[in-house]
Amino acid sequence: MKAGRTLVVARKEWLEIRRDRLFMALCLLVPMVLMLLFGYGLSLDVEHIPFAVVDHDDTPASRDYSARFSDSRYFDFRGRLADEGAIDRLIAANALRAVLVIPPGFGRDLGAGRAARVQTVIDGTFPVRAMTMRGYVLAINAQASADLALERARAATGADERSLAALAQPVRLETRNLYNQPLRSVWSMAPKLIMVILMIAPPFLTVLGVVREKEGGSIFNIYASTVSKAEFLVGKLLPYVAISLFNALLLFGLARWLFGAPFKGDPLCFALATAMYVACTTGIGLVISVLVRTQTAAMVVVAIVTVVPAALYSGAIIPIESLSPAAAGVAHLLPAMYYAQVATGSFLKGVGWPVLWPNLLVLAAYAALLMTVGYLLFSKRPRA
Amino acid sequence: MNPVLGWRGVLGRGLELVRKELLQLWRDRVLILFLLYVFTVDIYLAGSGLSFSLHNATIAVMDQDMSQASRELASRFQPPQFRRVPAPADPRAAQRQLDTGRSMVVMQIPPRFQADLGAGRPADVQYLVDSSNSVLGLLAGSHAAEIVGRYNLEQSAARLAAAGAGAGLPRVDNAQRALFNPNQNEAWFMGIAELLMLVTVFAIILPAVAAVREKERGTIEQLLVSPLRPLEILLPKVLAMTLVILAGVTLALAVVLRGVFDVPIRGSLPLFYAISALYVFTTSGIGLLLATIARNMAQVGMLAIMVLAPMMFLSGMWTPPEALAPPVRALMAVSPMHYYIDAGFGVLLKGMTLAELAPPLLAMTLLGALAFGAGLARFRRQFS
């Protein structure tokens, strides 16, 4: 393998990319646009939930209770409904997402020191939002019950504030949200988006570049030339790796400064892991492009092998521990999970080499494996 | 209309072309296999793999009291939400366990916990949550608040009773009822969402790829020198693709959604088919538009991503309109997919009728007609 010939192949490829202006522009634009859209469009923060109340009790106690919901930043109070009749229709039409129903006798039950029952009807169509809403309702309700108990204890015993607090709330739970203290979903998403986009874009570019030559027939020039397999493959892939690395830098910039995600880890560790991950995903593209013949088929196969694993089996959305054992097994076989841990670790958790070195090792092994497989499968004397 | 052939002749010729297109699609075995794959396996994977709820969240309890009271509290963190993992020995080990992701929550119960409770002093329990996934962080926190809140109520009720302050403490039981998907079955949402997404992807990609392939191979010139008008060339193509996509929808509905996931189809199936046909037909205009811009397959692939990604993220599937910034929400109004999602979920899951769905359907038709008109106009200009 000669460096000179490799560079010539790389230069030829680079010129080809550059002269296809639209392709070149899209190479750089697509990852950025995806990042912006996912970042802004995939907000999992559920706030301003359109909310209404059916208050059959209409006592100070019931009004106090419903005010806890309407005053929170999660719920936007849209008014009171006279009865339950219209709830289903309004939620179906997306006019409301949650309705609190307070039955008669609410205030009386509380006054008598009994449990008062209420119901919250929520839109269950979208389970993520529904789960989050449930979380808010749970938290607000737990606080309301605790406050009621405190008031009751005050009235009953007349003890001083300190012992009252201990009486009504014997265990105080101090919850600390590590790594993402404001619970901002864009902070959670940004590092994982880098992982997802770098999983999809590099193989896509690579297969289009390689298979284009196969489909157009210009690959026969290569078959007939003195360029060796390794020289051709390395030269061919270099420009795509370079573009992907440049994109990685752009994505990092967007995550860091546009979305404001904190970067607390070791930049060198992260950069190295990113380079290896890009080599992995480019390698996936290489293997696919050796196996298929047409650009359509290439795009289709890339879509199948990258999109689903990146989104579902990487811990991007669901943590690996929550996956079924089979799915968790799949996750361990793919590079996405290892890089996702590096990305989250470097951005939010502020961990470095001591924690992440096994991941880097796996990524390096993976990249080497894919490149070797691609090299072995590629033949200058294809059958038929 | 054609003066020689008349209406009937034109229609016959059109049908013959539809037959030709269907035959051509049928002979593209890669495509057929891919369609079979996505409308069954892909939807199955999407539906079965995802779970956004707090499921098996790993919790390590550092019980420094080792008393009956502390064990009682810790034992309330139960599956399916929580899964206990071995406790770290000291705070540094705890930090490391969180850093490496081996546990998501570390709860620390202080020494003298039971003694404090007995003496009526407040006991502070530390609850550290890995919130690098913001949604799960929130859920882990609110579930803990609920569990501890309940524990507190029991404790104070017992204490107050002992102090002779009356029988019970007031509390609110808030029963939550989720409409349309009472058990928060993610498979229902993900399955339907994936189906609606695939319909959109193919409605745009199939016509775009078909038209660009004709351009790349030069067969478009053959069609142009034939006595066919642009509309007569395009309509059969689009019709054939609509039929293929509806066949895929049928497969997905019958085999995966009804067969495997037991999605209750609450509305009218003919209505759903009519809406989908209308949507596919009109949205194909976007694909035609892309085909007039791109010169080769690589470009059309990239352009399709650039168009599809924003459409998906502005569809309201992942992020409800109320959670988006106002300018982004305005963009949502021009995404035809947004209306298709509303109508699709409306019919399938919510059992809405044509009259209830009139506003989104009207908007969808209007936008679709615009897209189709624009695609057709550009195609005409480019080729005649």
Image: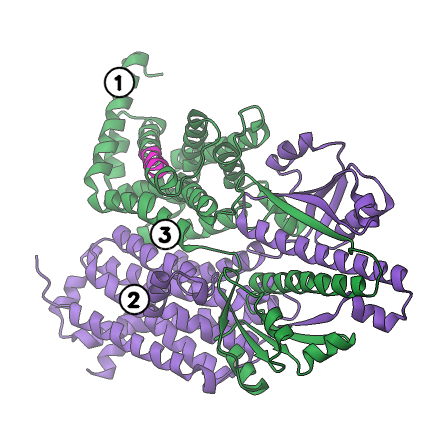
Chain colours: A purple, B green
Identity of the residue drawn at 32% across and 40% down: B211
Q: Amino acid at mark 1?
A: Gly
Quarter that holds the N terminus of chain A: bottom left
Residue located beneath label 2 in the image: A284
- Up/down of B238 relative to A363, above or below: above
Residue located beneath label 3 in the image: B45
Give the magenta part as a residue range.
Answer: B244-254
Magenta-colored stretch includes residue B253: yes
Asked if one can make out residue A292 in the rendered structure from this viewpoint, the answer is yes
Identity of the residue drawn at 66% across and 55% down: A138
Instruction: Say yes or no: labels 1 and 3 on the same chain.
Output: yes
Instruction: Measure the C-alpha gap from mark 2 to mark 3.
Output: 21 Å
Q: Secondary structure at mark 3?
A: helix
Circle 2 packing at 10 Å, graded few (<14), some (14-19), many (20+), is: many
- Up/down of B129 relative to A297, above or below: below
Q: Secondary structure at mark 1?
A: helix
